[in-house]
Image (cartoon, rainbow, N blue to C red):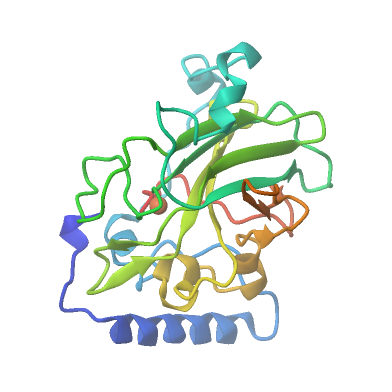
């Protein structure tokens, strides 16, 4: 989605070599120790991040000052219907209806309750309702792809939606993102907001995707992949996936850096 970063002459084979080189370099640097669970900001196979990542120390601002003007929300601001992205229009969206559920936990395993969770995704054809997504896949008049949930007392959330399709992006020639759902966790203040992506098990594009592969620790990558859970599936209605999120600590789910764009 970054025209300045487009390199149509760059092939998937070129990117595959770079991914393998970066992975080997990180393994060497770790020298048998733990691999970093966060990607390098200048991870070269993901071309646009190499062009826009910060090269200077971030300017630290007083969080309290920012929070004076930050957005705020209350329980009554989020309607229960916002957790069902299949009922936002007059008709039903096309695609595979799914339920995604799980718990949001802190690093000590405690539930993160009353948490605003925001979700956005492509439709079943892999198309976003966004002016910068003009690739030739159909929009669905019955699917916007945006939802919100507030977690329960046990930190749980439950989302009904359509399984998103993979979509092309212009990182290199014939570049495709694995199917994913974007998640934002608001925290207790705007300055704590964390953003990540949830993937689906067994996606054939995992090995080819520079965003997914920018996390060089395989265990950290796998924490972004939901599991199919037959107990979540609803007969004659929807298949179910379970995805738990740990916000902090050594088993935390990877979150995007503050300056990331969201392909
Ligand atoms: Fe996306």
Q: Quadrant of residue 75?
A: top right
Viewer-proximal residue among 69 and 91: 91
- Residue 198: x, y in percent? 56, 54
**Horizontal arrangement in the rendering, residue 213 relative to residue 132 (left or right):** right
In percent of the image, x 38 and y 49: which residue is there? 262
Q: Quadrant of residue 125?
A: bottom left
Viewer-proximal residue among 2 and 180: 180
**Horizontal arrangement in the rendering, residue 223 relative to residue 184 (left or right):** right
- Residue 53: x, y in percent? 35, 55
**Figure quadrant of the N terminus:** bottom left
Viewer-proximal residue among 45 and 164: 164
In percent of the image, x 74 and y 43: which residue is there? 103
Q: Quadrant of residue 101?
A: top right
When the figure is inspected, residue 30 is found, relative to residue 70, above or below; the finding is below
In percent of the image, x 58 and y 40: which residue is there? 160
In percent of the image, x 48 and y 56: which residue is there? 180
- Residue 163: x, y in percent? 50, 53
- Residue 192: x, y in percent? 58, 34
* Label tally: 0
When the figure is inspected, residue 28 is found, relative to residue 182, above or below; the finding is below
């Amino acid at each position: 989605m970054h025209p300045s970063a487009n390199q149509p002459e760059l092939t998937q084979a070129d990117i595959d070599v770079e991914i393998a080189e970066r992975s080997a370099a990180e393994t060497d640097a770790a020298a048998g120790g733990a691999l970093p669970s966060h990607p390098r900001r200048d991870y070269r196979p993901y071309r646009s991040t190499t062009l826009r990542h910060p090269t200077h120390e971030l300017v630290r601002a007083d969080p309290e000052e920012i929070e004076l003007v930050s957005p705020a929300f209350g329980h009554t601001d989020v309607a229960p219907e916002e957790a069902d992205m299949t009922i936002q229009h007059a008709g039903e969206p096309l695609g595979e209806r799914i339920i995604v559920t799980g718990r949001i936990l802190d690093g000590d395993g405690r539930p993160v309750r009353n948490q605003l969770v925001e979700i956005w995704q492509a439709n079943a054809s892999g198309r976003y309702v966004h002016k910068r997504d003009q690739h030739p896949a159909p929009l669905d008049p019955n699917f916007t792809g945006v939802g919100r949930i507030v977690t329960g007392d046990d930190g749980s959330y439950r989302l009904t939606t359509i399984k998103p399709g993979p979509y092309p992006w212009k990182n290199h020639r014939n570049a495709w993102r694995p199917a994913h759902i974007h998640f934002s966790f608001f925290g207790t203040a705007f300055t704590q907001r964390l953003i990540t992506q949830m993937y689906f098990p067994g996606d054939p594009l995992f090995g080819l995707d520079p965003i997914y592969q920018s996390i060089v620790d395989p265990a950290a990558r796998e924490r972004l992949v939901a599991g199919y859970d037959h107990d979540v599936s609803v007969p004659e209605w929807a298949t179910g996936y379970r995805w738990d999120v740990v916000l902090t600590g050594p088993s935390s789910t990877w979150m995007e850096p503050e300056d990331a764009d969201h392909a």
